[in-house]
Amino acid sequence: MIPGGLKMVIADLTIFPVGAGEGLALEVAKVVKVIKGSGLKHLVGSMGTSVEGEWDEIMTLITQCRASLRGTHRVYYVIKIDERDDPEHSMEHKISAVSR
């Protein structure tokens, strides 16, 4: 268990505006900038970004990502969360376990 009884969360986030046209790179880049600025461990992928932290940190980050798209008429979110109390199962651990 993480010190203080906190659990590790790995969240896979896909957040993008709907109806903003075919190319979404500029809008997605706004969200990725927020994620990078959070200081949380993250891995940017082609279809989403994985982020590692505590529950409250992840929820705060999602709220900040939402704010980065303020003024957008419609935003689509896909949020997958894996919460566990054994921090040795980090994003890197999961990737290396599959690679082996």
Image: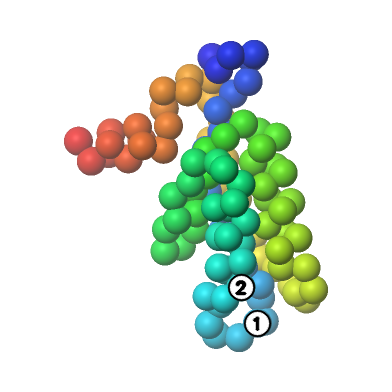
Horizontal and vertical percent position of residue 38:
61, 47
Q: Which residue is mark 2?
A: 27
Label 1: state its secondary structure: loop
Real-space CA distance between mark 1 and mark 2, rounded to the nearest whole angstrom: 9 Å
The residue type indicated by label 1 comes to Ala
Is 12 positioned to the left or the right of 45 in the image?
A: right
Q: Which residue is mark 1?
A: 20
Is 67 positioned to the left or the right of 27 in the image?
A: right
Farthest residue to the bottom: give it: 21
Is 47 positioned to the left or the right of 98 in the image?
A: right
Horizontal and vertical percent position of residue 44:
45, 56
Q: Quadrant of residue 5?
A: top right
Q: Is residue 75 above or below residue 51?
A: below
Horizontal and vertical percent position of residue 24:
56, 77
Name the quadrant of the N terminus. top right
Is 94 positioned to the left or the right of 76 in the image?
A: left
Residue 49 visible somewhere in the drawing: yes
Horizontal and vertical percent position of residue 72:
75, 74
Q: Is residue 13 above or below residue 27?
A: above
Q: Are marks 1 and 2 in contact (CB under 8 Å)?
A: yes
Q: Quadrant of residue 4?
A: top right
**Which of 58 and 98 lies nearest the eye of the viewer?**
58
Within 10 Å of the Cα at label 2, are there few (<14), some (14-19), or many (20+) other Cα atoms?
Answer: some
